[in-house]
Image (spheres, grey):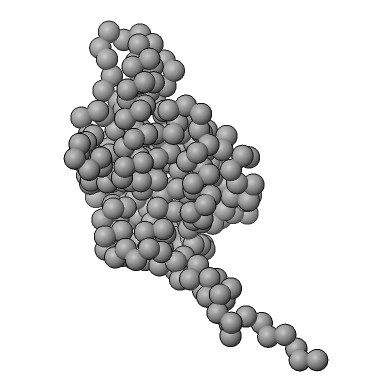
Amino acid sequence: MNLDTLRDSFLDQLRTVRRASSHTLRAYAEDLRQFCAWREEREKELSPESVRAYVASLTLERKLAKTTVARKAAALRAFFKYLQRQRVIAHSPAQELQTPRRPRTLPRALSEETVTALLAFPESARDRAILETLYAGGLRASELVSLDLDDLTFDSENGEGELRLRNGKGNKERIALLGRPAMIALQAYLDTERPTLASQAKSARPTRAVFLNRFGSRLSDRAVRRLFDRACGTVSATHKLTPHTLRHSFATHLLDHGADLRVVQELLGHSDLSTTQVYTQVSTKRLKEVYEKAHPLAQPQKPQE
């Protein structure tokens, strides 16, 4: 059984049929490559015992985090289930695989004051438009860099706009809303810096990407993450700033200001409401902190002298 060839056909099925995101494809490809290399190096037979031994080695030998081990195990389950459907194997060796329970952690949201400082951090019109668009629309970095000019809709009457997101998680399409500050920043970039960046392109065919790099081609999500890395030291010494931190902040701030949970679900593009409900815990925690600071009977009582 040539697992490398079967792995390639599995990834192709993920891409063409299930329309998995590029991030998922890269992760699954690397996870399966590592398993195949481990099995070949140890000359292990494909069996439930060998799969369990591999997953155990991820924790005991490589000391990987529980979330990483759980993802790699999920990749194996999906791969062997595919082979079972293709009648390559009769039974999946990962069917009874037990993995460590993922710790349930609350998403970390920035305060509104920190977000304000972050949005004011960039010196270039492009970088400011990136941050404003991410926060206003609750976008993932991959969704931002996939935007084309045709995906933008401007409302000249109220100064607001919409984004058509065609490359969301699972390739689900949705609409993101942009308020006036984001639209002002985006328009400033499109009018000033983007034409200059586009002129650096070597290709005779101009790109339709909204956000460009210094070579005039589509910006990568890695470049967006580097922008957040630069902002960390200046804006927040206590938080690791990432594009997803800004997305978490978008959802939390909406709920803090009374937005309906299902509206937030739609804006985030979550298929399952339970995925969005985690943000209610963040908001409740913040309400409790404010309550304990503000309510006279919630504060620790001073001992009477």
The relative height of residue 91 versus residue 171 in the rendered view (above or below) is below
The relative height of residue 146 versus residue 287 in the rendered view (above or below) is above
Direction from residue 273 to residue 253 in the image, left or right: right
Q: Residue furthest front?
A: 157
Q: Whole-percent x and y of residue 210?
A: 31, 27
Please tell me which residue is depicted at 63% across the width and 51% down the height of the picture. 238
The relative height of residue 193 versus residue 100 in the rendered view (above or below) is above
Please tell me which residue is depicted at 50% across the width and 33% down the height of the picture. 122
Quadrant of the rendering where the C terminus is positioned: bottom right
Taking the image as drawn, is residue 73 in sight?
no
The quadrant in which residue 144 appears is top left
Looking at the image, how many numbered discs can be counted on the residues? 0
Taking the image as drawn, is residue 238 in sight?
yes
Direction from residue 64 to residue 176 in the image, left or right: left
Please tell me which residue is depicted at 52% across the width and 75% down the height of the picture. 291
Q: Whole-percent x and y of residue 107?
A: 48, 58
Quadrant of the rendering where the N terminus is positioned: top left
Please tell me which residue is depicted at 32% across the width and 52% down the height of the picture. 268
The quadrant in which residue 213 appears is top left
Direction from residue 92 to residue 295 in the image, left or right: right
Considering depth in this image, is 238 or 303 the residue closer to the camera?
A: 303
Q: Whole-percent x and y of residue 287?
A: 48, 71
Direction from residue 78 to residue 290 in the image, left or right: right
Q: Residue furthest right?
A: 305
Considering depth in this image, is 4 or 266 the residue closer to the camera?
A: 266
Q: Whole-percent x and y of residue 68?
A: 51, 51
